[in-house]
Image (tube, rainbow, N blue to C red):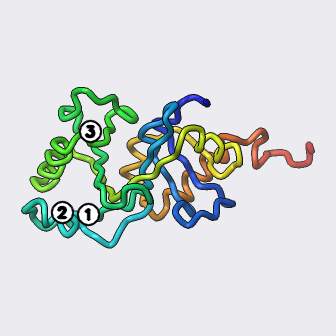
Amino acid sequence: MMKSLKGHFLIASRKLNDLNFYRSVVLIVEHNEKGATGLILNRPSSFSITNALSSYFDLPRLEDMVFTGGPVEPNGMFALHNATDLEKTQDPIVPDLFMGSSPDVFEQVIWRIAEGDPNLDFRIFFGCAGWAPLQLESEIYRMDWLYTRATVEDIFELDPYDIWDVLIERAMAEKRFLPQETAHPEWN
């Protein structure tokens, strides 16, 4: 098994034709000998958080969209957040980023969202992506995926509609043996 990719972005290569992952960026939240789990970051759904959770919580109108995290457990809901005080036993995915570790933490994150906590960065997801043991490694070996280290800033600050373009260029630049441009092409 390769080293753990927890805390990395998987970026779908241009040749990956699986409609579940076409031009997707997946944050790997867990990767070990049992397999891997991730959340697709660039698939906003058509549901606002308020609409998605109205039967569970009495929330004020929240326009933030729920994201489609992947084809596994499509009715399950997951929260990415930076509320370090809520996660006493969970290791962060990357520094200051957690996936809600329990229903209680998920509910507390939702209430902080509803109260307008200015220090809370978050995303809510329906479903997740999952790989069996060694499946992800096989797909990377086939060059279906590129990967690069994830940052909280990329997750919360990049436009979800632009993140694939930004990260595919970054991952390709990290993997290049030779620079793409040279100051002296005549030296070739």
**Direction left: furthest residue:** 58
Relative image position of residue 19 (x, y in whole percent): 56, 67
* Of labels 2 and 1, the one closer to you: 2
Please name the residue shown 17% across and 52% down the image. 110
Report the Cα–Cα distance between label 2 and label 3. Answer: 18 Å
Q: Circle 2 is placed at which residue position?
A: 53
Q: Circle 3 is placed at which residue position?
A: 101
How would you rate the neighbour count of disc 2 (Cα within 10 Å): few for under 14, some for 14-19, many for 20 or more? some
Secondary structure of the residue carrying numbered label 2: helix
* Of labels 3 and 1, the one closer to you: 3
Asked whether, in this view, residue 99 is left or right of residue 164, the answer is left
How would you rate the neighbour count of disc 3 (Cα within 10 Å): few for under 14, some for 14-19, many for 20 or more? some
Q: In this view, does 85 lie above or below 41?
A: above
Q: In which quarter of the image is the C terminus?
A: top right
Report the Cα–Cα distance between label 2 and label 1. Answer: 12 Å
Q: Circle 1 is placed at which residue position?
A: 64
Secondary structure of the residue carrying numbered label 1: loop
Amino acid of disc 1: Asp
Secondary structure of the residue carrying numbered label 3: loop
Please name the residue shown 31% across and 60% down the image. 75
Please name the residue shown 59% across and 63% down the image. 18
